[in-house]
Image (cartoon, rainbow, N blue to C red):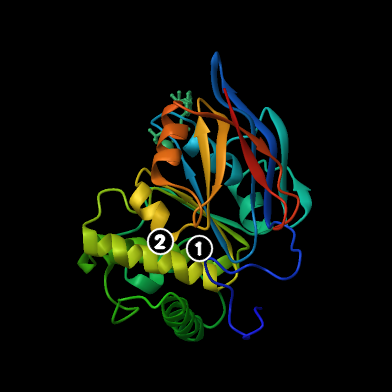
Amino acid sequence: MTPAGRAPQRGDVMEHEESPLLRLSKLTKRFGAVEAVIDFDMEVFPHEVVALVGDNAAGKSTVAHMIAGDYRPDGGVMEIDGKPVQFQHTQDAYRAGVATVFQTLALADNLDVTANIFLGREMRGGRLLAEERMEQLARDYLGRLNAKIVSPRTPVAELSAGQRQCVAIARTLVGDPKVIVLDEPTASLSVSQTAEVLNYITGLRELGLAVVLISHSLTDVMAVADRIEVVRHGRNNGSFDTSEVKYEDVLSAITGATRWTRTPRPNRQSHGTVRRG
Ligand SMILES: Nc1ncnc2c1ncn2[C@@H]1O[C@H](COP(=O)(O)OP(=O)(O)OP(=O)(O)O)[C@@H](O)[C@H]1O
Ligand SMILES: [Mg+2]
């Protein structure tokens, strides 16, 4: 907490040293001859949104799939809340406190919001009791995100694209996660729906989670992220504090016009990138 007693917000300088909820060290993934991700480093602290940006095929989704337990890394170390983890399956990641939302969202249109939030994780017990409990919790998750959804009993087929994204994000809260990864949550959304989803992301930060935001939109990234990690050809190419960096510097890191080496970030205080060549 900050001295004022409120949850930390973007731009706050943290007084105490915290350890990251997610740390990737030299994470590597190859698909045959394709070097999708090589020696990739990244840390995400509680109450922090870190944007993972890069050109098409840079390796962003591959990083997300490794964090989600879909892909097994060929090398490197992944730590959740200070503990090294090796996921064999997405369920392992879920149990370790990782939730991921991919672009497909995987919602069932014919079911309502509550049923979608608990899809595959339905509560058991007396049928009515479990139904009521799930609806109550769904309402609670939507409330925490300040969701613009009137009723948790609304069929998902009736929701806007922004609201659908909200249901997918609310679903991640079921497992009480520490780390949330969002792969292109604003792709193909209108301006107002994008603003809505960026609000949900801010809500996740206020809940104290570590959020990884993968996005092609530097405007969205600059609006909501605390830091930016650039991946180029599967490797780190720059790590920036959003409050300090210029749009053009991020752009030139993405395109490779500028090359950066990255120093690890053991805590919130020490960190930096150094321009190369
Ligand atoms: N399952 C797979 N099998 C083989 N190659 C893959 C697989 N997944 C990703 N790749 C390759 O790994 C590289 C990185 O792909 P990835 O999807 O991670 O990029 P990305 O940064 O998410 O791109 P985009 O912005 O287009 O979503 C690409 O060359 C891609 O073709
Ligand atoms: Mg991708």
Tell me, yes or no, if residue 104 can be seen here: no
Which residue corresponds to the image point at 43% horizontal and 74% vertical from the top-left?
A: 145
Q: Residue at x 50, y 83 (%)?
A: 133
Q: Quadrant of ligand 1?
A: top left
Quadrant assignment for the C terminus: top right
The local crowd at label 1, few if under 14, some if 14 to 19, many if 20 or more residues have their Cα within 10 Å, is many
Q: Mark 1 points at which residue?
A: 172
Q: Which residue is drawn at 33% across and 59% down?
A: 108
Whole-percent x and y of residue 102? 42, 48
**Which of the image's four quarters has the N terminus?**
bottom right
Give 7 or 82, whichever is nearer the viewer. Answer: 7
Task: Please name whichever residue, 245 or 210, is drawn nearer the observer in this view of the structure.
Answer: 245
State the residue position of label 2. 168
Measuring from the top left, give residue 272's x and y in whole percent: 65, 44
Looking at numbered disc 2 in the image, what kind of residue is underneath it?
A: Ala
Circles 1 and 2, Cβ within 8 Å, touching? The answer is yes
